[in-house]
Image: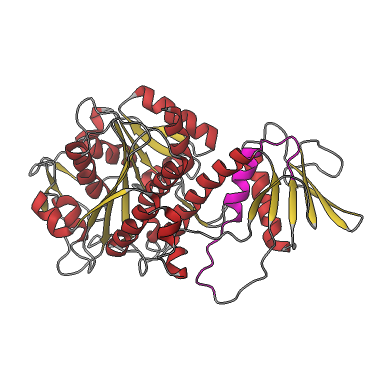
Amino acid sequence: MDISQYRKMFTEKSAEIFDIANAFEILHAEKLEGEVIFHVTDEKTSLLKKAGDMVVRENNGQTEIDIYTGGEKERDRWRKTGGRIASWMKSHCPESAALDCGPANRRELLVGLFLGAYEFSKYKEAKKEVSGPLSVVMDKADFDEVKIICDAQNMAREWAHEPASVINPWTLSDRARSFAMVYGLECTVIDDEQLKKMGAGAIVAVGQGSRTPSRMIILQYPGTKSGKPVVLVGKAITFDSGGLSLKTTQGMPTMKYDKSGAMAVLGILRAAAMLKLETPVTGVICAAENMPDGGAYRPDDIIRSLSGKTIEIRSTDAEGRLVLADGLTYAQQNLDPRCIIDYATLTGACVVALGGTRAGCICTDDAMFSGLFASGEKTQERIWRLPSDEDYFNALKSPDADLKNSSGGREAGACVAGMFLKTFINEGMPWAHLDIAGTAYNMDGSAYFVPGSTGFGVRLTIDWLKSLQ
């Protein structure tokens, strides 16, 4: 059964889970036709002085808009220009429009358009005026590829936006099964009882205070060429209250985004399958809800992870590293990875260190880091390498267990958390840890992101995967 046949089995509401609707359609076209014509220019004039400036003029009953990209030193100018056009479309709602790309990098202009056209409005009762389609004249193959990647990223954003009342470890498992059928993947869901029998005590502990206990979800894309898979491990804390180490009132809003790492993994798998990438890719989703109740795990508990290592709990709010520890171990024990990348909104310390500009990265392989770094610079999903000196592990030494899950201090928090994960990586295994705590969501929004989830990691990883072929 192909994708189109399977989708017919879904109700209209269910199909929307995968077909994320933007605020307006973006279509490929062979010629410029529309009520409004956008002309992109990088030529500064007396009226076009700074990036985003527009000049609107009427020409034989047609509205023409010149939009200035900014100078060549303006970083990310093509995507930002696309985002500004998307914002204008949402504000003015023309019946139809077309884009004359001018001197632009058409692919990156289109990225800004697709990402800028997205908005999360499914729960709003008031229906605002809807813009007509925007047509873009460019190479059809390039258009289709950019659309596939951006649709996948927008799905990751949509799912990250969903509250814990909609997505929890159980409902995420159900979505994953349907997702696998739609995109031709193999799906395995390991429930909490199976995880207990396996000895995956870390991920089980995190979810035992919730009415929806933990799940580990494995999704496999076979690639078009045989070989060892690139394994992507995603943190899916569907809501993080902090557990018994309860967060403050101010700290809990936005904690639905603590599943953003796993949502990026799902977006990557969708794009990889639709692009028919050569490289096999497997996703391991580590899903739990971190809640406090009488059965919740506690500070001072000692738990045994899937690796056999024992972990003393110092803070139940350092839960992401626990679920990832078992996910990383499972990947190495069962999936024979070519390499591993994990994605996690892991530490506030990384936000303090790098802000929302770059994700932190700890990596055991120089060539792997170089490739990821280059893809990050190319896609504007940028990373920065953090130190992984063994000295950082000293903060995790425990008198009663093999290690503890938190140092309890403020120093080098992102590095210490990364070193915790590194202890679960086998010698010689190429591994990169991406701490996306500062980049996974942006509550202020930006030139081509509305406030909320960004889907960080999808375009970065797809670009890197393509470079492996």
The residue furthest top is 367
In this view of the protein, which residue sits in the foreground, 240 or 226? 226
Q: Which picture quadrant has residue 36?
A: bottom right
Start and end of the magenta stretch? Answer: 100-124
In the rendered structure, does residue 105 fall within the stretch colored magenta?
Answer: yes
Q: Is residue 347 above or below residue 92?
A: above
> In the rendered image, is residue 163 in sight?
yes
Query: What residue do we see at 22% from left, 38% from top?
Result: 335
67 vs 191, left or right, is right
Considering the image in quadrants, where does the N terminus appear? bottom left
In this view of the protein, which residue sits in the foreground, 428 or 142? 142
Residue 185 location (% of width, % of height): 33, 48
Residue 379 location (% of width, % of height): 53, 37
In the rendered structure, does residue 432 fall within the stretch colored magenta?
Answer: no
Q: Which picture quadrant has residue 240?
A: bottom left
In this view of the protein, which residue sits in the foreground, 362 or 461? 461
Query: What residue do we see at 17% from left, 56% from top?
Result: 204
Query: What residue do we see at 85% from left, 39% from top?
Result: 45
Residue 32 location (% of width, % of height): 77, 47
Q: Is residue 414 above or below residue 301?
A: above
Residue 375 location (% of width, % of height): 48, 32
Q: Which picture quadrant has residue 457?
A: top left
The residue furthest right is 60
Colouring used for the render? secondary structure
286 vs 360, left or right, is left
> In the rendered image, is residue 298 in sight?
no
